[in-house]
Amino acid sequence: MLDKIALFFIVVGGINWGLVGFFRFDLVAWICGGPATMLARIIYAVIGIAALWSISIFFKRITTESDIEHGAI
């Protein structure tokens, strides 16, 4: 469940960075009233933590039905 929550925040961050890159528009800052507001800083921090959490996904084993059928788990 935490992986999915982290993925959600990473997608939000990716969309925000895409908007900044293509249109010079920071959606998070716009919603929060500026990039230096406490709410914007919290959102940026949560997105950063989600990105750090998601590093662990690289090291997780993906379980398939074939693994289960062959007793690999």
Image (tube, rainbow, N blue to C red):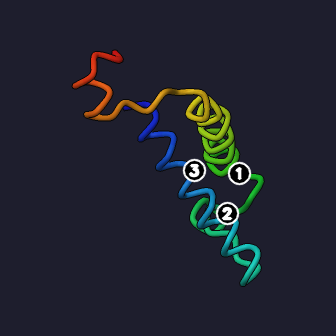
Is 15 rendered above or below residue 23? above
Picture disc at residue 29? 2
Picture disc at residue 37? 1
Q: Which element type, helix, strand or loop, lies under badge 2?
A: helix
First in sequence, mark 3 or 1: give its number.
3
Check the picture and name the quadrant holding the N terminus.
top left
* Quadrant in the rendering for residue 21: bottom right
User: Which amino acid type corresponds to the residue marked 1 in the rendered image?
Assistant: Thr
Q: Which element type, helix, strand or loop, lies under badge 3?
A: helix
Of residues 57 and 30, the one drawn nearer to the viewer in this rendering: 57
User: Which amino acid type corresponds to the residue marked 3 in the rendered image?
Assistant: Ile
Picture disc at residue 70? none
Tag 3 residue: 10
Crowding at dot 2, Cα within 10 Å, few <14 / some 14-19 / many 20+, comes out as some
Give the residue drawn at x 34%, y 15%. 73
- Give the CA separation, mark 2 to mark 3: 16 Å
